[in-house]
Amino acid sequence: MTIQRTILIACLILFAATVQLSGSVVVIDPGHGGPGASQFGSNGDGAGTCGPTPDPMSEQWVNLQVGLHMKWLADHELYWGVTPRMTREDETTYVSLPDRVQKAKNFNAYYFLSIHHNGDTSAAKQGTEVFWSDSGKAIWGDPQDPDSTFWRSTESRDSVYAMKVLLRLIGAWGYTNRCDVYCGKPDCMSGCDESRRADHKFVLNHSHDNYYCALSEASFITNYLEEWKFLNDWSTNHITSEANALYTGTRSHFNKGGIAQLSNTYLGGPGDEIAVDGIVYTTPIQFAWEVGEQHALQAKNLFFSGGYYYYFHHWVHLDPVFHQPMETHYTTDWYVTVPPEFDFHIYLAYFTGGPYSCEILEPYGGNTYRVGDTLQIIYTCDAGVEYTTLVDVSLDRHNGHSGYPEVIAQNVPYQDGVRWVINGPESDSCLMKVAIHDFVGNSASAISEHYTFKVHSSFCTSCGDASGDGKINISDAVFLMAYIFAGGTPPGDCNYAHGMGDADGSGTVNVSDAI
């Protein structure tokens, strides 16, 4: 009895959860169709395009098959919680554009996805587009409470939904330059952005009142290769791939999955140093990932590019709002699990490597510094990742001819200065050198600005020792008076800017120094 009661309670809980989740409807809208439509040669009264072959495949048929398979996937997903509805389920049913919009409203749609395939006079044209409305709209705050509404923010509007569908479609085709040919721009996400953000499609322009809406043009059926992909055996053809892409893109958005943005960060610019699930990509690249999915990220440990070596340092998962690190990983391979509640996930692979540069601000050429004083050596460096690039500081007292034999500091952080307690011997031809370097030998260096600086002995710090006997007393005043009024011996300069007789430090030697 106890076992039966437990089973009954579990069934009731599962039923209640299913009822609660089933209130969200995705309306699947296969474009075109109508009387006279057929798989080959005719799209019916609803217009559309056909393939380039002698027995051309009709767009309406491909749209319908993709839609039906997407519905099958949704019907067989036990825990997704979104109920699929179709605007048409056969070839010869004609549904006008206003009727398609009205059906979505009658179904209380949470998503409206219109499925199409592109056409062009050129059989070589190919590409993928997903359109959305860029108008703001009020939507349900809670799918179970139609009276709860709010104005959708920019981050939550149809663009995020459309981008997730687009990214899944690109993944279904197996290569990332789906927009390259069509838009003539190298980066699909930014290159096709303006062409996708449009209100000229009727169902988009008239559907932005209470549901997410997107219109897909997944491929060019007028392209020989892309039409051929729909003619293969049903178990392997592209209809199933596109249907799965539309389904998982919608599910990712519904489950609050994120768009993952991956790139490397070395100063040389983007390259193919990142692999995702074993496939190497040119970065930056984006994916529509779902909550809980696991993906393998890989970065090269060492590579050569543009005359410099680059060394992998760490992965980081950034907060999408403030771009602060949430996770850091210090090995090239990282298996990530997609967290919830973010529209965007940012994963960066940090590398250290050139080109580098540096500049010395202090010591400054022409200045004189005293033995025994403490000097803050100040420099600026253009470096890679923090704590991966280090600095060496060295000194040459012979105008650089001795090869900077005196090491002041070694392997210190590039963003900090160095404190140096000045030591002898004296020299009027000192140069300071700062060299920045990384783990694999890339480096750059700088010499102290303009010209040499001086290092002088500490006994010259007694400015009133006019006679040079190492003492300051009345004899120095007498010595100065004889120099000033009787043309006596001048005070020694000791390589001192204004001579040892400048007792008051005014920059000149006169009677006030004697006083």
Image (spheres, rainbow, N blue to C red):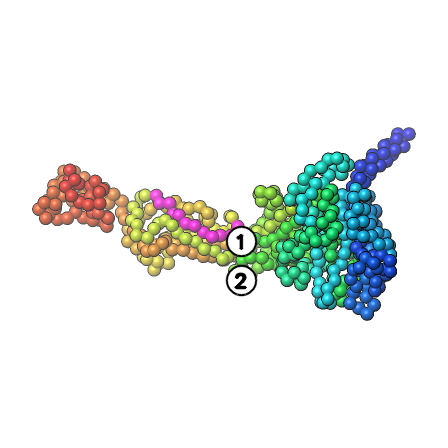
Q: Amino acid at mark 2?
A: Gly
Chain part drawn in magenta: 374-385
Q: Amino acid at mark 1?
A: Thr
Considering the numbered disc 1 on the image, is that residue within a helix, a strand or a loop?
A: strand
The quadrant in which the N terminus is found is: top right
Q: Is residue 74 or residue 324 the one in the foreground?
A: 74
Q: Residue at x 84, y 59 (%)?
A: 44
Could you say which quadrant of the image residue 94 lies in? Answer: bottom right
The quadrant in which the C terminus is found is: top left
- Provide residue 507's location: percent of width, then percent of height: 22, 45
Residue 47 is tagged as: none
Mark 1 or mark 2: whose residue is earlier in sequence: 2
- Return the residue found at the far top: 1
Gap between marks 1 and 2 measured at Cα: 14 Å
- Provide residue 17's location: percent of width, then percent of height: 81, 36
In the displayed structure, would residue 335 be above or below residue 187? above
Q: What is the chief secondary structure element of the magenta stretch? A: strand
Q: Residue at x 25, y 43 (%)?
A: 461
Q: Quickly name the residue at label 1.
A: 352
- Return the residue found at the far bottom: 54
Q: Quickly name the residue at label 2.
A: 306
Residues marked 1 and 2 touching at CB (< 8 Å): no
The reply to whether residue 322 is visible in this rendering is yes
